[in-house]
């Protein structure tokens, strides 16, 4: 199935033969109709084949404050040609205070994502705040603070990394934690700022996020990028080294995609209330000079003082709570962009209001049901007198009576495992 089909439904008392993973909560059986990537795509660079697993070459650096991967500052002939064709982006004038007025977001009242570029076109910064979104998903999925923190960080990373993609394109981040009590964390974002996600253990007790994810216990970070026009998704995978999401995703970007980025994502909670959530990504663009890179890293260090004491997280260092501490005290995405691009003539590119999206439906539920044998479906109806399922993303519960199920089976045609057949019946695979 395509990545867009990742509606997670749980059907009570189902066997595990047709699904992926395990259900969550009392009386719940297998998860079905879930997209699971089966291949790992590796990319080639001028230095050879990049491995999918391993440690970053610069793992002594803090990936929230430094670029883990160093790009060659010399432009290729093709890059020179592109920059010659499109010089406007390289000569962006600094925004005046009046031009920045639409991007102010006092006390982060609204969820907001802003992207900006340095005046020389060598650095792009995207910063985000999603406190309201996180509180909404906590209510939908009845999350406690620890799984909410893991999901918040994952959705933040997904939104940051999908910024600039085509609106139809999707970015899926999965943390597979076979030996961590949270079990799994999934976030899917699109190019329009929509996001959804879930965790394997929503009621997990309070503990450090790295303990919940299972640092150093064989977990993986898996990235899947998909567009409806692509014949196959792009897949990448690296090992979990830190267990705090953002640093592990940063290592993935350095190792699997050779992107020179500084990435941070964090959140703060007061009981079951999220008080701050967000992050930033700073990326070197083609031709970024050593001088510009050094200035950005100098500016990133200033965020630590603005952010506070790092929440006392010895494992994550002084940057552990970046930038949630700054957001909690009223700092905004615009403030983050301005600080990172200090002395580099910031030009705001755009802003987006992130939001939760879910494309679950009765049609998707029945598509999942059809992946079971008819004998299994009949047995469930005989015992329960209905089919009941819950979407793992938005928490919506769907119920189908025995008569409706029979009518749908009679009208069903084609193969439910094929997107083309599903669309022919009036469903959507996007």
Image (cartoon, rainbow, N blue to C red):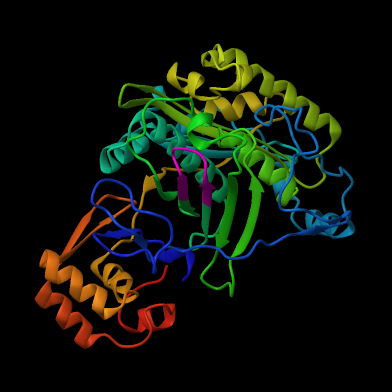
Q: Which residues are magenta?
A: 173-187
Residue located at (59% from left, 39% from top): 217
Is residue 168 shown left or right of residue 409?
right
Examine the structure image and report whether residue 184 is included in the region drawn in magenta.
yes
Quadrant for residue 365, please give it. Answer: bottom left
Examine the structure image and report whether residue 118 is included in the region drawn in magenta.
no
Q: Nearer the viewer, residue 430 or 123?
A: 430
Residue located at (35% from left, 52% from top): 357
Is residue 95 shown left or right of residue 172?
right
Relative height, residue 106 to residue 393 (above, below): above
Relative height, residue 395 to residue 82 (above, below): above
Quadrant for residue 204, please give it. Answer: top left
Relative height, residue 218 to residue 397 (above, below): above
Q: Nearer the viewer, residue 211 or 195?
A: 211
Spot occupied by residue 297 in the image (x, y as percentages of width and height) = 73, 26
Q: Nearer the viewer, residue 92 or 365?
A: 365
Spot occupied by residue 126 in the image (x, y as percentages of width and height) = 58, 38
Spot occupied by residue 411 in the image (x, y as percentages of width and height) = 22, 87
Spot occupied by residue 349 in the image (x, y as percentages of width and height) = 58, 43
């Amino acid at each position: 199935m395509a990545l867009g089909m990742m509606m997670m439904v749980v059907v009570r008392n189902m066997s595990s033969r047709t699904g992926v993973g395990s259900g969550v909560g009392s009386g719940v059986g297998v998860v079905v109709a879930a997209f699971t990537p089966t291949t790992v795509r590796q990319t080639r660079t001028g230095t050879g084949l990049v491995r999918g697993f391993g440690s970053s070459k610069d793992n002594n650096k803090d990936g929230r404050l430094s670029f883990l991967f160093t790009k060659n500052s010399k432009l290729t002939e093709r890059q020179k040609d592109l920059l010659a064709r499109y010089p406007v982006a390289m000569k962006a004038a600094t925004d005046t205070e009046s031009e920045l007025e639409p991007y102010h977001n006092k006390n982060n009242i609204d969820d907001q994502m802003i992207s900006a570029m340095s005046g020389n076109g060598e650095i792009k910064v995207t910063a985000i705040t999603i406190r309201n979104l996180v509180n909404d998903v906590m209510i939908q999925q009845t999350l406690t603070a620890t799984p909410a923190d893991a999901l918040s960080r994952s959705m933040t990373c997904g939104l940051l990394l999908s910024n600039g993609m085509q609106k139809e394109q999707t970015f899926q981040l999965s943390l597979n934690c076979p030996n961590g009590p949270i079990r799994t964390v999934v976030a899917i974002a699109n190019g329009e700022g929509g996001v959804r996600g879930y965790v394997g253990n929503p009621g997990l007790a309070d503990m450090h996020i790295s303990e919940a994810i299972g640092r150093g216990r064989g977990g993986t970070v898996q990235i899947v990028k998909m567009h409806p026009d692509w014949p196959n998704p792009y897949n990448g995978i690296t090992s979990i080294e830190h267990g705090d999401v953002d640093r592990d995703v940063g290592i993935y970007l350095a190792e699997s995609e050779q992107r020179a980025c500084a990435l941070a994502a964090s959140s703060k909670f007061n009981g079951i209330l999220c008080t701050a959530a967000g992050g930033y990504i700073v990326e070197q663009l083609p031709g970024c000079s050593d001088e510009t890179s050094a200035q950005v890293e100098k500016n990133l260090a200033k965020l630590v003082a603005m952010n506070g004491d790092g929440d006392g997280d010895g494992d994550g260092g002084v940057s552990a709570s970046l930038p949630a501490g700054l957001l909690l005290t009223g700092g905004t995405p615009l403030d983050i962009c301005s600080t990172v691009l200090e002395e580099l003539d910031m030009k705001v590119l755009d802003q987006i209001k992130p939001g939760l999206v879910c494309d679950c439906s009765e049609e998707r539920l029945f598509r999942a049901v059809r992946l079971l044998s008819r004998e299994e479906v009949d047995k469930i109806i005989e015992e329960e007198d209905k089919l009941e399922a819950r979407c793992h993303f938005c928490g919506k519960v769907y119920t189908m009576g025995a008569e409706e199920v029979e009518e749908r089976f009679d009208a069903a045609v084609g193969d439910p495992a094929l997107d083309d057949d599903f669309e022919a019946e009036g469903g959507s695979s996007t």
